[in-house]
Image: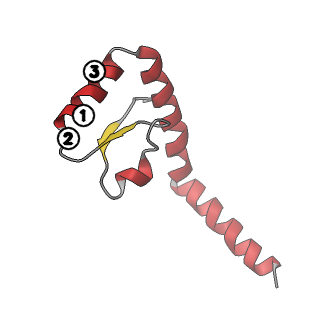
Amino acid sequence: ACKAVIGTRIPGLVDAVRDGETGHLVPTEDVGALTEAIRQLLGDPDERTRLGTAGRAWSERFTWDQITRDQEQVYEAVVNAR
């Protein structure tokens, strides 16, 4: 499902969520910032849709099939460079 994401700036999540593009990241342990991010998304259905759609597209780059294709391209480039 294409759902908007709000998370905290922790290792791993900062690589998975592109702040302002695929979701919103707020400082860790900042309840006020988290509350405001939730309020913003609740009040803006267009923004929720935009972030959710972009997040879904971004996540498709990380399927096993896509990762395999990317790795194959790297190996082919190395072999062809010889």
Q: In the displayed structure, would residue 57 be above or below residue 67?
A: above
Callout 2: SS: loop
In the displayed structure, does residue 29 sit left or right of residue 1? Answer: left
> Dividing the image into 4 quarters, which one contains the C terminus?
bottom right
Vertical side of 18 occupied by 78: above or below: below
Q: Give the label on residue 39, or none.
A: 3
Report the side of 21 relative to 78 (left or right): left
Residue at figure coordinates x 52%, y 57% from the top left: 64
Residue 54 spot, x, y in % from top left: 52, 34
Q: Distance between the residues labelled 3 and 2?
A: 14 Å
Q: Which mark is residue 30?
A: 2
Q: Which residue in the protein does label 1 denote?
A: 34
Task: Sort mark 3 into few (<14), some (14-19) or many (20+) by Cα contacts within 10 Å.
Answer: few
Residue at 51% in and 29% down: 53
Give the alpha-carbon distance from disc 1 to disc 3, as whole Å: 9 Å
Q: Which of 80 and 8 is in front in this view?
A: 8
Callout 1 environment at 10 Å: few (<14), some (14 to 19), or many (20+)? some
